[in-house]
Amino acid sequence: MQMSSKRIALVSGANKGIGLEIAEKLAQTGMRVFLGARNAALGEAAAARLREQSLDVQFIELDLVRAESIQAAAKQIDTEFGRLDVLVNNAGITDPSDGLPGQASIDAARRVMETNFFGALAVTQAMLPLLKKSASARIVNVSSGLGSLTFNRDPDWEFARVKLIGYNASKAALNMLTVQLAAELGDTTIKVNAADPGFTATDLNGHRGHQTIPQGAAEAIRLALLPDDGPSGNFSSASGPNPW
Ligand SMILES: NC(=O)c1ccc[n+]([C@@H]2O[C@H](COP(=O)([O-])OP(=O)(O)OC[C@H]3O[C@@H](n4cnc5c(N)ncnc54)[C@H](OP(=O)(O)O)[C@@H]3O)[C@@H](O)[C@H]2O)c1
């Protein structure tokens, strides 16, 4: 095991999009970053590109819907460093057969929940023993404004028409994980917060988002770098606190 003075970070779904940006920016602060990806070729290639900038980035296989992949990743980080300082639960999916609650495919809603909620929960549970060995750990759940119950019931909200029962419920559940885990870990130095990236141009939405990827990644990065007197159990975007 290496006794690294660097902070050790893991970002899921980091081969592209917002996750890749988070991995790059955290590495630029001097962290050792495990770049999680379910596809080894894509993950290796993304990590290699970041290493070309002399960043300390290593691909790690992490598929949120495969328990053995999650366990192997936790074991690898334990063997190499014996702790984890930052976990960013970024990986997420949408599904073309998701939709309004009266019409969506139940299988599609289950698939989305499986990755976006159960996958993040499973990764968090697997990494928790390592996070508890950190002097000051951070967990960031990459949520969405679409997961806000308050926004969903506001007919005047900019995205009021985006009623995807599987996706929106998966992010509401991720918000619940944020609140409950922050309470459970309230007497520790681990901070748990949820970031809303805002509508960001990535593959997830066919690049229709209004924001750039650096703009979409900014709040998750800020929360991953919170100082020791920072908040826990919060839900926020780059423009400030979000309603639950
Ligand atoms: N873009 C937006 O407007 C927006 C807004 C609010 C919230 N978000 C959230 O931001 C996060 C990042 O999304 P993005 O916009 O950057 O989308 P993206 O470019 O599609 O990236 C999604 C990432 O998640 C990975 N992933 C999907 N399923 C996985 C699994 N089972 N195991 C491991 N990795 C998996 C993807 O891997 P592959 O390349 O192998 O598919 C990819 O690396 C998501 O949680 C999303 O819900 C995005």
Image (cartoon, rainbow, N blue to C red):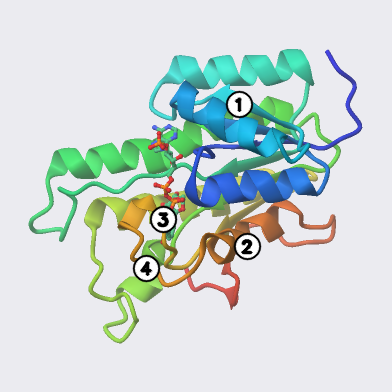
Pointer 2 residue: 218
Label 1: state its secondary structure: strand
Q: Earlier in the sequence, mark 1 or mark 4?
A: 1
Residue found at the far left of this picture: 103
| Distance Cα–Cα, label 2 vs label 1 | 22 Å
Where residue 3 sits, quadrant-wise, is top right
Placement of 3 over or under 5, stated as above or below: above
Q: Is residue 97 above or below residue 33?
A: below
The reply to whether residue 191 is in sight is: no
Tell me what residue is drawn at x 48 percent, y 18 percent: 69
Place of residue 87 in the rendered image (x, y in percent of width and height, measured from the top left): 65, 40
Is the residue marked 3 within 8 Å of ligand 1, measured from its CB? yes
According to the picture, the residue beneath numbered tag 1 turns out to be 59
Disc 2 residue: CB within 8 Å of ligand 1: no
State the separation of the CA atoms marked 1 and 4: 36 Å
Q: Which mark is residue 149?
A: 4
Q: Residue furthest bottom?
A: 156
